[in-house]
Amino acid sequence: MLETEVIRLQAALRKKDVLLRAKEKELKSYYFAISHELKTPLAAMKGYLSLLEEFHVPQFTSEAIQYIDRLRNNVTRMQQLINDLMEFSKIELLETDCQTIPFGNILNETLLELQYSIHYNQVKIIQAPDYPAVYCHSQFLIRALINLISNAIKYSRTRTSPEVEIGYIEDELFHKFFVRDNGIGISKPEQAQLFQMFRRLKRKDGVDGTGLGLVITKRIIESHGGEIWIHSRKNHGATFFFTLPKY
Ligand SMILES: Nc1ncnc2c1ncn2[C@@H]1O[C@H](COP(=O)(O)OP(=O)(O)OP(=O)(O)O)[C@@H](O)[C@H]1O
Ligand SMILES: [Mg+2]
């Protein structure tokens, strides 16, 4: 009796999983199609803006020139959003693309990509004495780390001694990592919105971005079978923890 019940439950779960995956696929192709369609008219808008700037500026008032400038900024922002949405829609982890690779190598590549920003903002990077090897899609994991570490830099660079630590905590079932900074931090109510699409927190600190970085990061970590969460207090830095299953 109990056994048939378990089998029935397993079958129901499998069915739900298949339906969910199909829905997710549909949604992703929808994002992709929209992003793709928006790209062409936006490029055209940018082209016309360049023509206006190049050949017609003498006829414009200084107010009109200011509007053109704002238009250009908005078009650029929209292009960033579209690129991020396209990136998001392309995240699909195939078993064949995964391999066991030392986390230290992944981190080195990430830090190399962020070299300029680290140097320019004079950020102290603290690493763990040792990292394990992880089973992952290296390019996706690098993308997730770039997002976390670039946020840590972006939101701590106004401090006198900005510091970013990439740590590792031994755990029984999971590899547990964290990215900690000593920056502006995030209040509890704001934390609830962090991983939602287009929920860029409103701040007057002039930092740019589309607000999709953490959504993409969460998607990458979860598609590896891991989890991501945050510990933070406003003005007391932020720590993003994430796990990857041990295989
Ligand atoms: N380390 C951090 N410290 C403080 N606030 C953060 C940190 N990381 C993220 N946030 C807050 O979470 C919001 C969402 O982060 P996310 O990376 O998704 O977007 P973004 O950095 O604004 O833009 P993008 O990543 O597209 O450049 C940010 O706008 C910021 O307000
Ligand atoms: Mg970001």
Image: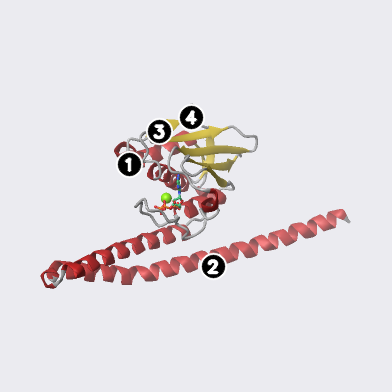
Q: Residue furthest right?
A: 1
Badge 1 amino acid: Ser
Callout 1: helix, strand or loop? helix
Relative side of 124 to 49, left or right: right
Labels 4 & 1 near each other (Cβ < 8 A): no
Separation of disc 3 and disc 4 at Cα? 10 Å
Q: Quadrant of residue 35?
A: bottom left
Separation of disc 4 and disc 2 at Cα? 40 Å
Mark 1, Cα crowd under 10 Å, few <14 / some 14-19 / many 20+, is some
The picture places residue 108, in percent across and down from the top left corner, at 40, 36
Separation of disc 4 and disc 1 at Cα? 21 Å
Most foreground residue, 15 or 49: 49
Callout 4: helix, strand or loop? loop
Cβ of mark 3 under 8 Å from ligand 1: the answer is no
Badge 4 amino acid: Ala
Q: Is residue 184 visible?
A: yes
Badge 3 amino acid: Ile
Query: Which residue is found at the position 62% from the left and 34% from the top?
Result: 171
Q: Earlier in the sequence, mark 4 or mark 2?
A: 2
**Which residue corresponds to mark 2?**
26
Question: Residue 125 has which mark?
Answer: 3
